[in-house]
Amino acid sequence: MVIALMLGRKGSQGFPGKNTFPILGRPMMIYPLIAALEASLVDDVYVSTDSDEIRNLTLGYGAKIIDRPPELASKKALGEDAYVHGYRHICNHLDEKPKLLVLLFCNAATILAQTIDEGIQTLQKDPTLDSAVTVSAYNMWSPIRARKLDQEGLLQPFIPFETF
């Protein structure tokens, strides 16, 4: 079973309301939600949130809600912790672990169903891989976050993790 888990909270400091900000007539979070729902290889979609607005929009599209606790919805909370919380909720809800979990963010309006399916297919074809990510060229990021392609076409850190 392949499950999509989308994360979005209401308390953005830098851009309040960004997840529900209208882009081309739709709240931003609807675009990754539609991509997940339309991906042919995704069996079910969950959204982890503390926002009533995100919750109501999600339910209107038929996805399932994970109520995120306040300690995982603050500006100090780590996305990784919200992800683990969502994963555990899904495992409990399904009574099994999903084979693959697609992690999406409410503010990732440019993701496409085709891209999600391509990532899933890549992982299904090569069991030595444990993850697939979308990337883009963006020159403002720190070298610590930068990645480069190796000879097999896999992403490797630009600066080795051992450095830290």
Image (spheres, grey):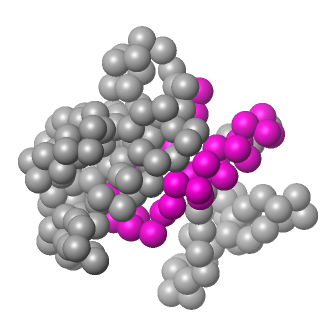
Instruction: Give percent across and percent down for residue 2.
Output: 54, 32
Instruction: Spot the residue most to the top.
Output: 95
Residue 110 falls left or right of residue 22: right
Q: Determine the image quadrant of residue 82.
A: top left
Percent of width and height locating residue 79: 36, 51
Q: Residue furthest left?
A: 52
Q: Is residue 27 above or below residue 54?
A: below
Q: Which residues are magenta?
A: 99-127
Can you say which quadrant of the picture contains the N terminus?
Answer: top right
Report if residue 158 lies within the magenta region.
no
Quarter of the figure with residue 9: bottom left
Residue placed at 36% from the left, 17% from the top?
A: 92
Residue 39 drawn above or below residue 91? below
Place of residue 156 in the rendered image (x, y in percent of width and height, measured from the top left): 73, 62
Q: Residue shown at 73%/47% (left/top)?
A: 122
Q: Is 145 displayed left or right of 63 in the figure?
A: right
Most foreground residue, 22 or 95: 22
* Left/right of residue 138 with respect to residue 152 in the rendered view: left
Q: Residue furthest bottom?
A: 139
Question: In this orientation, does residue 18 appear?
Answer: no
- Between 40 and 49, the one lying in front of the other is 40
Residue 111 location (% of width, % of height): 48, 63
Is residue 128 visible in the rendered structure shown here? yes
- Of residues 137 and 4, the one drawn nearer to the viewer in this rendering: 4
What residue lies at 28% left-to-right and 34% top-to-bottom?
64
Q: Residue at x 27, y 38 (%)?
A: 62
Image quarter hosting the C terminus: bottom right
Residue 119 part of the magenta segment: yes
The quarter holding residue 151 reads bottom right
